[in-house]
Amino acid sequence: MLIARHLRHRYDRQTSDALMLGELALEAGRSCVVRGVSGSGKSTLLSILAGLLPPTSGEVLLAGQSLYALSERQRDLWRAQHLGMVPQRHHLLASLSIRQNLQLAQSLAQREDASRLQVLMDRLGLTPLARQRPEQLSQGQQQRAALARALVHAPVLVLADEPTSALDDANARAVIDLMLELTQEARVALLVATHDARLNGLFDQEIRL
């Protein structure tokens, strides 16, 4: 599902590589955690895998498509249709309700599906909150809404950046358990970048940068 080979990235004016990764392979329905200290390249790797940052060298294949063989405009559409993102800060649109945030994700992917949206909201306990706006939700609820948004358009890969950093122990475990359960059920590959030791032993594979 996801294959990354010989990735290397160096930002302008840097004298050393921000990222070096030999190979990453992640199958549908499987999970991977990427660990490393601050500055080790976790965020750089996620940006490259999301098609947002062309690597200095190397290749990213997602569902058989070479991401950087596409134009920037083509990558934008590919990302909207095939990738789900759970950022460290949820980035839900403050002017929209929770349901409208999910509907927008489906619309951008050109995959409107009201029944899928409702099933996800039910599974994640968001149905009673459907008309509320993000600032009216707790941090745990906001993160569940961000997870729903990442899955609502049936992606093939979900990328999560420090998804539990702002959560207490109970909410952190609940969010990760739901993330793992839903991606496994839907045969979605999941890659999580984190330094959260509370998540040790929960993923199928681990990469250290």
Image: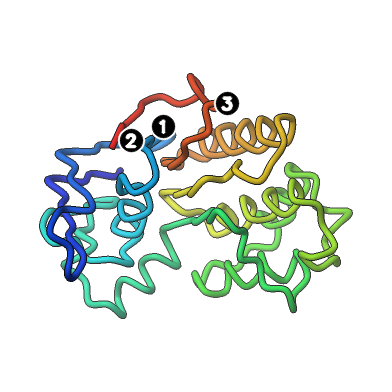
Q: Nearer the viewer, residue 82 or 10?
A: 10
- The answer to whether residue 188 is above or below residue 79 is above
* 91 with respect to 49 (left or right): right
Q: Quadrant of the N terminus?
A: top left
Name which residue type carries label 3: Arg
Residue at x-position 17% and y-position 69%: 13
Q: Nearer the viewer, residue 187 or 33?
A: 33
- What is the quadrant of residue 99 in the picture? bottom right
Instruction: Between label 3 and label 1, give the one nearer the viewer.
Output: 3
Spatial CA distance of label 3 from label 2 is 24 Å
Give whichever of discs 3 and 2 has the lower sequence position: 2
> Which residue has dot 2 on it?
27
Where residue 116 appears, x then y in whole percent? 66, 54
Q: Is mark 1 in CB contact (under 8 Å) with mark 2?
A: yes
- The answer to whether residue 72 is above or below residue 112 is below
Q: Is mark 3 in CB contact (under 8 Å) with mark 2?
A: no
Name which residue type carries label 2: Glu
Spatial CA distance of label 3 from label 1 is 19 Å
- What is the quadrant of residue 133 in the picture? bottom right
